[in-house]
Amino acid sequence: MTMVMKPRPLPGPLGLAFLIPTAAWFILRPFLDPTPALPTLYTSVGFSIVSFLASLYLIPALGQSFIKAGLKGKDMSKVYKDDIPESLGLVCAATYILLLILFIPFPFSQFLSRSDSEGLASVEFPHFQLSVYLSSVLSLLIAAMLGFLDDIFDIRWRHKVPIPIIASIPLLMVYYAEQGNTNVVVPIPFRAIFGTIINLGPLYYLYMALLSTFATNSINIIAGVNGAEVSQALIIALSVIANDCLYLPWSTSFKFQLPLYLLGGQADVDVGGVWSAGMAHGSKQLVERHLFSMYFMLPLVGVCAGFMYHNWYPARVFPGDTLCYVTGMAFAVVGIQAHFSKTLLLFFIPQIFNFILSAPQLFGILPCPRHRLPRFDPSANVLHPSTMTFAEKPPSKLGELILRAFSYVGFVQLTIRPEDGVIVAASNLTILNAFLVRLGAMSEKRLTQTLIGSQILCSVFAFVVRYGLASLVYDGDRR
Amino acid sequence: MTMVMKPRPLPGPLGLAFLIPTAAWFILRPFLDPTPALPTLYTSVGFSIVSFLASLYLIPALGQSFIKAGLKGKDMSKVYKDDIPESLGLVCAATYILLLILFIPFPFSQFLSRSDSEGLASVEFPHFQLSVYLSSVLSLLIAAMLGFLDDIFDIRWRHKVPIPIIASIPLLMVYYAEQGNTNVVVPIPFRAIFGTIINLGPLYYLYMALLSTFATNSINIIAGVNGAEVSQALIIALSVIANDCLYLPWSTSFKFQLPLYLLGGQADVDVGGVWSAGMAHGSKQLVERHLFSMYFMLPLVGVCAGFMYHNWYPARVFPGDTLCYVTGMAFAVVGIQAHFSKTLLLFFIPQIFNFILSAPQLFGILPCPRHRLPRFDPSANVLHPSTMTFAEKPPSKLGELILRAFSYVGFVQLTIRPEDGVIVAASNLTILNAFLVRLGAMSEKRLTQTLIGSQILCSVFAFVVRYGLASLVYDGDRR
């Protein structure tokens, strides 16, 4: 059955009449007296709205050109078989990167330096940080380019895993040239062995490269339902922003206390006030780092939100690898440059869970079919877990042990031959299949919502760990 | 007729046994005692050899993947109709940009600073120039990306002309953030009106954007014979390097006098010696600028040479727009960042000639067919000028005037109806057609050689103008 998919309706004049002036106000606000504290943050919010509008309008406008250029795919979990434009993540990436470049004069030139009046001019980036910013944009652009090449040339899975390492080269080169810090603070239990601070040297560069690879591929691998990739990116970006907000000096009218003792923390934190407020505890460097992170995350939220509107069930466009590469790289960039990579990893709990769950298939302990996405049942319009079979060869001892362990906690569904108890099939080891095993067959939309819900819950949990439990293994709030 | 094109033979073990150690020596030489003057220049030469080898080997290796991805074309001026892989300029661009990024630590970090010994450490880039370098690489990468998108989506001519302006945005943004100089020195005859120095302000940014557009499109437009685009790029790059060499402080053993009086200059110039030598006249800034230019031009020569080997008649690969975008942008980058854009434009004399010649067709004064490349005559295996016809409508008064003027100097061939002397057809107004009109029909290979020869002659002429005649309108050798 083929039906002609109508593009999703775009906001009418009323919506635009609200959004465009709002964006303009945020962008222009720093130029009006009295200059606000953190003026470039206003600009960044304005750019975020612009990026949302740009991706919202550009994606449907360019869809047909993508189909014409052969960038198209079928939706496997639908009854209709329309061509859906693929790789539209490229539009997001291009919008995002172009806005990041157009943003350069705001934090890095003199024309916002009137903010002296409040003594907050020092919040402005020091000039040399421009090269850090540029190397980040360069890494994002390489990620976008390689993601798109991956879509065009259809690179094999095992070749594409290290691609983000190439994209992180500018980051590493400039980090090296700028004599970046390669020290890490040792958790309290290990200090007897390693001391308080350990210099990882070249290992730190390896860590940064691996972080990019992880952030990129771990999002890319959770695919197969409409909106899966972009919703992960969106929630992680929002979590990073929420975390950044804790470190910024808000104006005093905002002031309130975070009751951290509820989470097991040792002290309350005043959020708000001027310099001395927030988790930054008066550290100008921490404020600058988290501002840097905000500048990259706010427009990312904009493009992702615009994209998600068109990628939502039933999807009108597909992201392609480009979107995952760019968003993953953006997370790696802020984690590395703003020095909160451990906190960042806490926002990747569902991805880490999926990776651990998938590892036996990825590393060849269990058979791995080409596609592991949930199986679509057109008659009921629901998704079932997809399976790997052991028809030819039973699983190895280790494989069987892993399967039985995962089955015990309800992440995998086993088909056991009643005669002899041998495992003949098992659901594929992905988070999406695990949801279907745990919660039963469901519609694609419901599965996406489940994924989103779990990502949000995990982010809440991440904050509890970061600000509640971290004090058990780290003193102070250095990073 | 279809024949299976054999890939061009690659250098055997003997060639590699020479090139690889040579590259390694240049890259490692700065680390050996005694540290040479300009150590990073050695590295750059080494990188240039690496880039040559990379493009030499990667291009034939990847050709089939390009064909498989639909990036292929037929050679219009050949008797055979094989699929030729198209857009291989992408491989050049990727190699070039990756090497530029890997080069970052050499000029910008501390590990080559041992060169203190000769008092030449100050030749090293100041740290803040890193952002200028990064913005240049960013512009090149955007140019590569947009060139490739142009190849994929086949953007219309009128839409693609402004594309280089987008690629120049990072350049302009960082120039602005870094409070770049927007003053220009006024030629002597105009000083009575404008003074010695004039601040162009925003016009300077417009000039920079237009320079990128010109450098890119003027190379792109001279296409249609094998090797046309890449040979232009190669000769311009070599001319820029020759010009840069005049400004570098060579070791004293190199010292010789340039007899500039022969060219009408006012004084001889000592090329060689230490600081005070060369056209730099002791200006550290000039030396730095021309080093910067060398860092971008040397690897460009490498990739272009490697590409040209495979693109030479009969071509095994086509460049696509990507190559023109990246090379054109590279010229704009060095012209802008190293402040010798006027000298740069002198190396574009054939392109400027072609642009002036083409203008009546480009701007609609005369009809412009979709393709203006020379017409192939398979029976004699030669190229003839292609034509525009006035069958439907005779040329306008202005059009006829232009055609008769160009015909008078022998750049265009007119077909005139004997009865009434009306022009019924004319050869298309391009430099390639002009060669064919002037020199008669010739083989494609010969036409490429003619183009190359004229480009070299024009570069020689450019040096005469720059160092001979420029003293008539400018005092000193400021830029």
Image (cartoon, coloured by chain):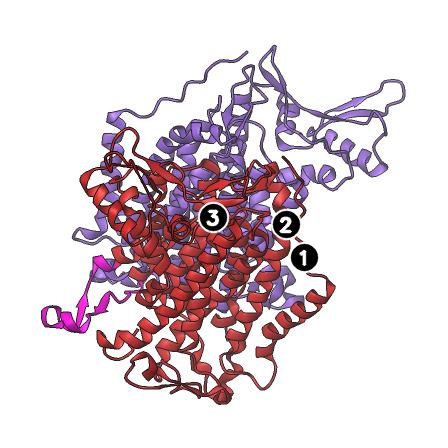
Chain colours: A purple, B red
| Residue A21 versus residue B55 in the image, above or below | above
Q: Residue furthest left?
A: B193
Whether labels 3 and 2 belong to a single chain: the reply is yes
Coordinates of residue B234 in the picture (x, y in percent): 48, 61
Q: Give how far across and how far down residue B182 sits, in percent.
A: 24, 65
SS at mark 2?
helix
**Location of residue A369 in the rendering, given as x and y in whole percent from the top left corner:** 72, 31
CA–CA distance in space, label 3 to label 1: 24 Å
Q: Nearer the viewer, mark 3 or mark 1?
A: 1
Q: Amino acid at mark 1?
A: Leu
Residue A161 visible? The answer is no
The quadrant in which the C terminus of chain B is found is bottom left
Vertical side of B232 occupied by A415: above or below: above
- Vertical comparison of B129 with B269: above or below: above
Q: Which mark is residue A47?
A: none
Q: Which residue is mark 3?
A: B322
**Residue in the foreground of this view, choosing between A210 and A473:** A210
Label 2 Cα crowd, 10 Å radius (few <14 / some 14-19 / many 20+): many
Tell how many labels.
3
Q: Are marks 2 and 1 in contact (CB under 8 Å)?
A: yes
Q: Give me the C-alpha separation between circle 3 and circle 2.
A: 17 Å
- Magenta range is B177-204
**Mark found first going from the N terminus, 3 or 2:** 2
